[in-house]
Image: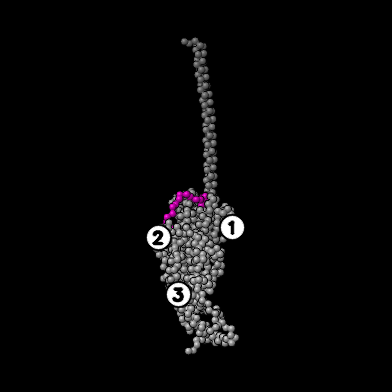
């Protein structure tokens, strides 16, 4: 009951924001080099962003092998990790981003009806 | 670093070990933790896991030149730093000097969504980065089990932990992994399955409302180790483990004797007092003068220039000093000279093991020649008799090894003639003095006797003593028809004896006078007789003379007559 209510109000909020047209998603994907999991995570998230957040997102892919300090700063434990910095609340998605529905739910986006 | 690497080798162990620098732990583990391998430190909440791990890192960085990484899953670096400041560990300074790297791993389960396959490579990267940044040789993961609650898939966590420990091993990191105690397992999530080289268990047990910390090396692959549970302390300098059960009856003895501080009591003990390094038990019921006896001993020890450590479980320092001053023993002067040290604690303040540890710590620091515990029976408040006896055995073993003369007092209850002590430690004592109150004639009087004294001739007499303003004074013995006379009975006996003496003396005087009189009478009679004799002699002489004269006269007369008659 509780989460649904929250989601409803978020929807209201989203609508309001969408009208203004300045809603943006700040996403950071932390990967570990070019491991198969990293590659598929990058591919999956790009696809999701293109399909669902057209033009309203800022996605950065960071290789923590190259920037280990960021891993500490952003409290990265699992890899790959997608950090949704904006809009708040902060969320972490861990995995190769293959579960699209889960990500869309987490991003407060409802999957498009096919 | 050189020290840390060489010492285990010199011990002849095949396994290389890394000294922790924690007092006693290196002895229990016979040289430290397995070098380059993970060690699991487990225990309940508040058992000291984090502290042990922190001390391992800090000592590694300071004493053995081995920098370390502290990866905390529970406390932020700030919190951790603050928590250990009280123990003199300055983590922030060490971090600034690049000797220790702190990393706080925060996992918020509520913001994590699982979307497909993943591993915990992020953790590895952070750890690798931290290790590289300080050139670490030691790693602490505290408490890594938090991952199980933070990461949705336990199978991934398990696989990754296994990989992590292997990875740390490959990197040659001497690692401490802490784990929360589980219900039937050492750790809640069975970390002991992954860390099989060394497992150390910390315990914080409460018995009779008193807590005691204990440490046990559960397992140490490839190395001998003490398997006993050892008590440990957390004091202002960190953790101290005391490997005490390893002591035994191996001490050497000496023939030197030390005064009891009471000359007449020394005389009862073969004239010389206690053996140096022996254990003396002074038992007695309340108010029999136990503290006075031991204070005399303390005073005598300090007078010789020996150091004396006084553990008081009943009275505060100033109270003992005041009370003993009233019987003429000035203990304060010795305290001021640093020869006498007091340690007054209520027995209930810690557990028995902790008491022992505190006492041993103080003994190690102060290095006394004499130790007094007044009274040990109060320890019964925190443990049962068997445990108290065990603890005292350990204490006495150590003290004997160090040749410290120990005087314990015991408060006995019940019948004053009962020859058993509450704590039943009489077998531990080399010399056992019993103080007792005797109740007779409406008064209580103090008496003492030597119940046993190993290896010396000693008096078997029951002596009365009084507490005077010059201390304990053993009195002469008066044995009456019903035993030793004490108190006023003794005084009246003394008076009687004096009276008898007086009568006898007077008798003798009278006899002397009689004799004199007799002699005088005799002499008078002799004089009489002599006078009588003289008179008679004179008379007889006179008679003889007269007779002579008469005869002469007669013969003269006859001649004259003849002449006249002209006869012949």
Per the image, the residue denoted by label 2 is: B14
The correct choice, above or below, for B450 with respect to A41 in the image is above
* Residue B322: mark in rendering: 1
Question: How is the protein colored in the picture?
Answer: one colour
* Residue drawn where x is 53% and y is 62% of the image: B237
* Front residue of this view, candidates B224 and B174: B174
Highlighted magenta segment, given as a residue range: B246-264
Q: Whole-percent x and y of residue A28?
A: 52, 77
Q: Whole-percent x and y of residue B519?
A: 52, 36
Q: Residues within 10 Å of mark 3 (few under 14, many from 20)?
A: few
* Residue drawn where x is 49% and y is 73% of the image: B122
* Residue A35: mark in rendering: 3
Q: Chain of mark 2?
A: B
Classify mark 1: helix, strand or loop.
helix
Q: Residues within 10 Å of mark 2 (few under 14, many from 20)?
A: few
Q: Whole-percent x and y of residue B382?
A: 49, 66
Classify mark 2: helix, strand or loop.
loop
Proximity of marks 2 and 3: CB atoms separated by less than 8 Å:
no
Q: Is residue B142 magenta?
A: no
Q: Is residue B253 magenta?
A: yes
């Amino acid at each position: 009951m509780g989460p649904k209510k929250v989601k409803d109000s978020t929807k209201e909020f989203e609508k309001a924001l969408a009208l203004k047209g300045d809603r943006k998603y700040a996403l950071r994907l932390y990967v570990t080099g070019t491991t198969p999991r990293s590659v598929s995570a990058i591919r999956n998230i790009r696809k999701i962003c293109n399909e669902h957040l057209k033009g309203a997102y800022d996605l950065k892919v960071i290789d923590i092998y190259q920037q280990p300090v960021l891993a500490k700063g952003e409290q990265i434990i699992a890899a790959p990790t997608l950090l949704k910095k904006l809009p708040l609340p902060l969320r972490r998605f861990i995995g190769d981003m293959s579960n699209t529905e889960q990500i869309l739910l987490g991003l407060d986006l409802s999957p498009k009806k096919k | 670093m050189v020290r840390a690497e060489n010492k285990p080798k010199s011990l002849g162990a095949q396994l290389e070990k890394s000294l922790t620098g924690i007092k006693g732990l290196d002895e229990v583990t016979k040289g430290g933790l397995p070098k380059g391998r993970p060690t699991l430190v487990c225990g309940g909440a508040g058992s000291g896991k984090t502290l042990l791990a922190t001390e391992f890192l800090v000592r590694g960085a300071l004493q053995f030149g081995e920098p370390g990484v502290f990866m905390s899953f529970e406390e932020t670096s700030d919190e951790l730093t603050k928590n250990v400041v009280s123990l003199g560990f300055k983590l922030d300074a060490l971090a600034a000097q690049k000797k220790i790297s702190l990393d706080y791993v925060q996992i918020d389960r509520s913001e994590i969504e699982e979307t497909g396959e993943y591993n915990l490579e992020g953790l590895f990267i952070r750890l690798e980065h931290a290790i590289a940044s300080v050139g670490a040789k030691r790693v602490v993961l505290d408490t890594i089990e938090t991952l199980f609650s933070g990461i949705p898939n336990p199978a991934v966590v398990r696989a990754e932990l296994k990989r992590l420990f292997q990875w740390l091993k490959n990197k040659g990191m001497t690692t401490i992994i802490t784990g929360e105690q589980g219900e039937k397992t050492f750790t809640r999530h069975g970390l002991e399955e992954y860390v099989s080289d060394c497992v150390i268990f910390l315990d914080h047990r409460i018995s009779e409302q008193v807590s005691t910390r204990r440490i046990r090396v559960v397992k140490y692959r490839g190395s001998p180790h003490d398997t006993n549970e050892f008590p440990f302390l957390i004091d202002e300098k960190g953790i101290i483990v005391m490997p005490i059960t390893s002591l035994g009856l191996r001490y050497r003895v000496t023939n030197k004797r030390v005064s009891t501080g009471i000359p007449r009591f020394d005389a009862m003990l073969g004239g010389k007092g206690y053996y140096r390094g022996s254990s003396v038990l002074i038992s007695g019921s309340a108010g029999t003068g136990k503290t006075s006896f031991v204070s005399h001993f303390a005073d005598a020890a300090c007078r010789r220039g020996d150091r004396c450590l006084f553990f008081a479980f009943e009275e505060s320092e100033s109270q003992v000093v005041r009370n003993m001053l009233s019987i003429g023993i000035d203990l304060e002067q010795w305290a001021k000279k640093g020869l006498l040290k007091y340690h007054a604690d209520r027995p209930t303040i810690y557990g028995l093991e902790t008491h022992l540890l505190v006492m041993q710590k103080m003994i190690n620091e102060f290095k006394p020649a004499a130790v007094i515990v007044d009274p040990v029976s109060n320890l019964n408040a925190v443990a049962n008799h068997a445990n108290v006896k065990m603890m005292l055995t350990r204490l006495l073993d150590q003290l004997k090894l160090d040749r410290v003369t120990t005087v314990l007092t015991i408060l006995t209850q019940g019948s004053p003639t009962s020859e058993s002590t509450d704590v039943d430690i009489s077998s531990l004592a080399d010399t056992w003095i019993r103080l007792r109150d005797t109740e007779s004639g409406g008064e209580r009087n103090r008496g003492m006797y030597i119940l046993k004294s190993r290896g010396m001739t000693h008096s078997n007499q029951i002596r009365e003593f009084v507490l005077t303003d010059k201390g304990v004074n053993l009195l002469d013995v008066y044995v009456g028809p019903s035993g030793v006379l004490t108190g006023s009975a003794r005084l009246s006996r003394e008076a009687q004896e004096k009276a008898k003496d007086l009568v006898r003396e007077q008798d003798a005087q009278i006899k002397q006078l009689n004799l004199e009189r007799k002699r005088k009478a005799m002499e008078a009679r002799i004089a009489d007789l002599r006078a009588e004799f003289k008179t008679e002699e004179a008379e007889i002489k006179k008679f003889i003379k007269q007779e002579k004269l008469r005869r002469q006269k007669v013969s003269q007369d006859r001649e004259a007559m003849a002449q006249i008659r002209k006869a012949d």
